Image (spheres, coloured by chain):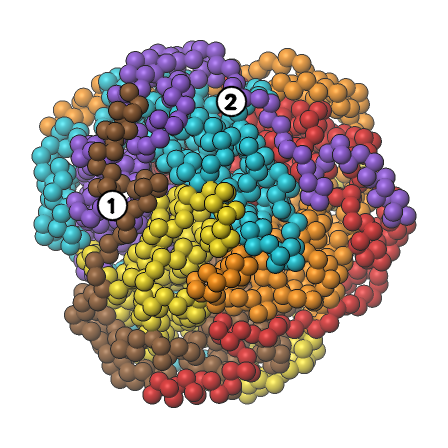
Chain colours: A orange, B red, C yellow, D brown, E purple, F cyan
Amino acid sequence: MFTHTSRLQFEAKPEKPDPVYARKLQELIGGAWGEMTVTMQYLFQGWNCRMPGKYKDLIMDVATEEIGHVEMLSVMVARLLEGAPAETTAAMVGADPVLAAVVGGMDPQQAIVSGGGATLSDSNGVPWNGRYIVASGNLMADFRTNVAAEAQGRLQTARLYNMTDDPGVRDMLRFNLARDTVHQNMWLAAIEELQEDGLEGPVTPSALFDEEHVEHAGTIWHLSDGTHGAEGRWASGPAPDGTHEFSYLQDPQPLGDVASAPKPDPLLYATSPANLGLIEKAIKKLT
Amino acid sequence: MFTHTSRLQFEAKPEKPDPVYARKLQELIGGAWGEMTVTMQYLFQGWNCRMPGKYKDLIMDVATEEIGHVEMLSVMVARLLEGAPAETTAAMVGADPVLAAVVGGMDPQQAIVSGGGATLSDSNGVPWNGRYIVASGNLMADFRTNVAAEAQGRLQTARLYNMTDDPGVRDMLRFNLARDTVHQNMWLAAIEELQEDGLEGPVTPSALFDEEHVEHAGTIWHLSDGTHGAEGRWASGPAPDGTHEFSYLQDPQPLGDVASAPKPDPLLYATSPANLGLIEKAIKKLT
Amino acid sequence: MFTHTSRLQFEAKPEKPDPVYARKLQELIGGAWGEMTVTMQYLFQGWNCRMPGKYKDLIMDVATEEIGHVEMLSVMVARLLEGAPAETTAAMVGADPVLAAVVGGMDPQQAIVSGGGATLSDSNGVPWNGRYIVASGNLMADFRTNVAAEAQGRLQTARLYNMTDDPGVRDMLRFNLARDTVHQNMWLAAIEELQEDGLEGPVTPSALFDEEHVEHAGTIWHLSDGTHGAEGRWASGPAPDGTHEFSYLQDPQPLGDVASAPKPDPLLYATSPANLGLIEKAIKKLT
Amino acid sequence: MFTHTSRLQFEAKPEKPDPVYARKLQELIGGAWGEMTVTMQYLFQGWNCRMPGKYKDLIMDVATEEIGHVEMLSVMVARLLEGAPAETTAAMVGADPVLAAVVGGMDPQQAIVSGGGATLSDSNGVPWNGRYIVASGNLMADFRTNVAAEAQGRLQTARLYNMTDDPGVRDMLRFNLARDTVHQNMWLAAIEELQEDGLEGPVTPSALFDEEHVEHAGTIWHLSDGTHGAEGRWASGPAPDGTHEFSYLQDPQPLGDVASAPKPDPLLYATSPANLGLIEKAIKKLT
Amino acid sequence: MFTHTSRLQFEAKPEKPDPVYARKLQELIGGAWGEMTVTMQYLFQGWNCRMPGKYKDLIMDVATEEIGHVEMLSVMVARLLEGAPAETTAAMVGADPVLAAVVGGMDPQQAIVSGGGATLSDSNGVPWNGRYIVASGNLMADFRTNVAAEAQGRLQTARLYNMTDDPGVRDMLRFNLARDTVHQNMWLAAIEELQEDGLEGPVTPSALFDEEHVEHAGTIWHLSDGTHGAEGRWASGPAPDGTHEFSYLQDPQPLGDVASAPKPDPLLYATSPANLGLIEKAIKKLT
Amino acid sequence: MFTHTSRLQFEAKPEKPDPVYARKLQELIGGAWGEMTVTMQYLFQGWNCRMPGKYKDLIMDVATEEIGHVEMLSVMVARLLEGAPAETTAAMVGADPVLAAVVGGMDPQQAIVSGGGATLSDSNGVPWNGRYIVASGNLMADFRTNVAAEAQGRLQTARLYNMTDDPGVRDMLRFNLARDTVHQNMWLAAIEELQEDGLEGPVTPSALFDEEHVEHAGTIWHLSDGTHGAEGRWASGPAPDGTHEFSYLQDPQPLGDVASAPKPDPLLYATSPANLGLIEKAIKKLT
């Protein structure tokens, strides 16, 4: 169960409205790598975590924080839209090119649908959806995704930081950048700890190593003609998991047979030599 | 530019058809963490990579391999569907409960739409889409996502491995498991190499550390009442990036003000005390 | 079965083209609360209505009208796009800032895909989809949604009315506003009549009141720290349905136990203390 | 900012696992009218509300409660999946028709993707998305939608209540039914209060009544041939808003002209008589 | 403007309910190639058609018919669901394997959401969306798509015809098959007539033939190693448009340069050799 | 299995960056009728083709070519974005209207998400998805769709050709136009050959002609009031398939009965006269 305070985790006050930037900020709310994604991803990972204790409690701590990030950004967007030229007509646009450009760069739904507020969409107006998250039950797989999400999130925040010089917006983004830093470090630490605790190995899942075709578990296949792929440490020597050995196949050949399709089912009407003559018969029957 | 051989990278021949399993395998084709995702993710990362050389060439090697994995799985699905009870009627179902169950567990679109072939959808029939991939231009962010994708991919393959005892299917999945192992190791090695080459640090992006609010770049906020979150290595001591220090805030307080919304625009008709009396006037005007 | 006349329900002739506004009008065609939604919602409600008679006939009357609204708006959009600067090049844009802004504010798909016509998308180009509608079989639930749809629809139309001063566009929107007024009133009247006819009560569905936990059927839980939530008529006294009593819980406590997750299935590879030592064994097996 | 307790708002313990029902319950989590929808809808309405005070505080109270409902349902789903036949093979299915049917009726992603946990999807596996919510800034429009959402929500909960006889599941659903009852009453009360406070009238928005075509603001158009549409109270007499008068048009005629499309732009290649002869010229040029 | 009669274009009465088949029929309502697609595609093509006269009138004739097909199928689905085992519990399922299988094969949303009626989704429950349609303004492009849509539609109808032996369902599908036959013939005839009228040539659009690289306008590139691709009439000789000549390139070589990416923008943080040393500096600044 | 060369099939070098055009080009990458669609459509058609030989080999030749088209366009987009004003602030926008307009017309995700590269979305930022493709197993149905896809593709390319005067972009589009010409001709030739080979007839599928209601297989229903629909060759005379006869029904009447819905299931709570009195009872029970 959750409780809420009306105070924001961190201040979200722009110095001036900026409706074009309000559209861009939507990427951090409803984008695939925005705050809504980490909120719902961590909540479902927490509810689905099979180990009571430090991992589950950490996940729930951070999940709860992230709901507050969606809140901060939504409030920021509403404030950036204050006084936006929402009712500008063609005549006004024709008279003022800067106004025209502002209107062109805005998200029309922030005015028409939300009445000057944020939507649950990205910067192109595409709605956030539940396939953006993953909660697999396997904490190593999940934490790998979490590091990725915080990295992409901080990258996008950094890009957006460079697209504004509003001191209020920048102040909030400085907080967001810092949180994305600690969360990256935190999930990296948790990944190390999962291994130290003997719960997971570096390769996920820690299973079926004796069933998989081991001769294919270390080879890089040279299938594109760039010649430098063999120069990295992935081309030879021990793999990071400490048990596999890398090698680089310079001239790999297909191991399987020709990709033939099975015999068709006549009642599904796939085109097939078995149909030869059927057309004539079909037509004869008809006429 | 690409070229193609009709031979599969690895054999994809089930011993027997199994239409219920054919539906499940769709998860590895068109699921958020399936082969289509890594194919398109690596292709766009490669095309968008700003460094000619070993990283770009590696990405293109693996991207090209992955198209062939979509191929193997699609051929396998078509073969698993051979002779599937696609035209079973209610009368036949009523007479044979096992047949009935098989029909219930099949993906109807594999018959009705694809005529006994794979679709570009997941195991619930939801189509694959382009928001599943990311190609950010930042190789650290991308490789983190790639590790995650290969980990979730191997996890799902392992689960599917346990859902069949068909020797032909298992043989192919043994190959897939092995490829997911080497690809996880490979991206982990590439992450190490990016750091050794001085191109990226552990936290992404390697920038804006002096702009972010440093006092918030190491704290975990205790916002859920589980008491064990402070027991991990993320609660104190040096962070994995070697420069930040972790701490755990036991009783964190909001730093921002109340989340008020800005003054409404009268022409957007938000409900507001400024409207008091407007209704009466509106109605009077009308009558 | 339907028939069609080429004449529009109401005129849809702009005085002048306005391609930026043509993009905005898409919200009324293919937006979640646009005319396509009410069209399909009413059609499915009508086809799914279990009572022959006045309700079903009314629904089909209005559903049939709404198809004509999609028509009016689509024709209006095509006319607003007449002579739109669809082939403007970078050189032309660089020479004329107002033209540039117009190009920036247009929907590129209206030119590239539809050749100067409307699409079945909203003002951000997101396609309309069938999850926007509901036809539940329960007329009270459906009519509640219909009032909401007409209210959001009229609100959006009113906002768009303020974004143009073209007399032809405004003339059509004056008609649309009026239709949204009568449809709101009409569904409100139908809701009253459903109750007078003894078919539905104010709370939907009119069932299971004796099964639900009655002690939780009147309490508002104070879970956010705003102090004014208890000042409305929902905080005490009789509820609108005439049978429940409201109360406001100032300090609500969770009634359930800790949200633990069940024991993991080993073949699904959830991280769990039961796995302790498995990693070592897995690796040993491999080496 | 939010905080969280690990205790659930209400208990969520099934007596026995039931994986087929676990799929159905997804409708209440990630369906268009599920708990995720009301959670996000109320959060965005609260953040976007322009009036500090009782309405905003109430919205935030209920929004915060709803996050806890997503939690309860997700935990319930995980528990219903305990011991689900996730690794059943074709051989096992062939030997046990009931097991086969259970496998057929399960959501495969709950096993393959989530490892035995809930997903953020509906009962057909379609992901929840942000277009399901609305936060318009106009409280009357929003509260109308909220009543509809709680009505559809209670209706779906009631249907699901009849699909199980597990005492633990039913106990939780009895709580959910009760909450949907009070929330319907509460939004109905808030709608009355908005009008008593003079903030909004029954028709939304309370504006532009003097601009709309008043002669079309009371007529029902008889466009479907059912003869009973004129028998309801919407066919004549005063409308619920107290200012309009209903009438029923028995033989309505289109008011607009023929729906002609504007002149095509030659560079967009619409088919048009203006192209006559162009084809020949194009071909001549080529040959 | 449209009008409606309550009578169906053709009868839609199953002899017996069949809820598993009701799910499959959804493909013809809300699938990518179902009746909803042709309805909306033809409506938008008609509204967007730039030539008054026979083509536009034909399109509107058929568009109007298709709305009635969505109606017939929706009514059929509701009737197939009559008495469906919507409230079956686990205990009932355990006792009756055929019932269990039926429950497994049903669409749960047809019960939970629609109360025993059709939804606007396909047979996997994925909602219909507006990107399934195209109305390009170019009648040749549109009619090509229409032939394809009617062909896929008839194919799917034929497959579904073989999945039932209910005389009432089959009677309706016999009508649908016939309509798909005439509509295929009709669009094929309209394609011929467009050419006879000199409005469009066989290749779309009839333009830019003198601008395109003519040396690449007749060659088939042999990029897959199957050896039979050169055996068809597309490998040599005159092309169907009567002006181009086919040839088959046995060993095609790339014509472009290496696919390098442009110089990165430092403020977008792409990984690049230009960053060498930046990490160290960034960290030094921080510590 | 696939292999790749780093050289592009054709050069993709713009003379100058043009970020507004980079957004528009997305339509050819990730639009419903873009290169991604034909790539995946042909791949799945090839893998699903039941006839080894010339048709399958041709499909795989072209499919393999199309992957290279996605590559060319993605590289072009990255190059068009070089030096794009991705970090422009409000102050810079206010000072330079042309810059402002450029920023307004750009796709924000190309900067924020992809760091200056292409995305897998269309020109409105909507992601490509797997429902855009079809691979039915029936080659006639598939080839009809392929002609349509190449026609819409060439049409969109032609429109985009007119929207730029950059010599480098135009050079690549001249190649693309030529490829779309040969591919249209090629699928048209393959359609003829399918018939000459006796594999498929003009109407798809070549089956069930003796089961369909033959009296409805040639009639056009006059359901819209345009009077010219009867003037085309589809209104009388032999149909293109050579076996059916067209006729035009001037005053078509519905053949079916009234579209009544079946009896409701009481546990699904549809509104129904059978419920009369239930409300009172429900309330009485409660009080």
Q: Where C8 falls versus B73 (above or below)?
A: below
Tell me the residue that label 2 is attached to: F9
Measured Cα–Cα span from mark 2 to mark 1:
52 Å
Image point (32%, 62%), residue name: C14
Q: Residues within 10 Å of mark 1 (few under 14, many from 20)?
A: many
Q: Looking at the picture, how far across and down is residue D58, in whole percent?
A: 60, 77
| Quadrant in which residue A144 is drawn | top right
Chain letter belonging to callout 1: E
The local secondary structure at tag 2 comes to loop
Tell me the residue that label 1 is attached to: E169
Chain letter belonging to callout 2: F
Q: Nearer the viewer, residue D20 or A188?
A: A188
**Residue B87 in view, yes or no:** yes
Q: Looking at the picture, how far across and down is residue E189, in whole percent?
A: 18, 34
Q: Amino acid at mark 1?
A: Val
Q: Residues within 10 Å of mark 2 (few under 14, many from 20)?
A: many
Is A128 placed left or right of C268 in the picture?
left
Q: Where B219 falls versus A260 (above or below)?
A: below
Q: Looking at the picture, how far across and down is residue B236, in whole percent?
A: 89, 52
The local secondary structure at tag 1 comes to helix
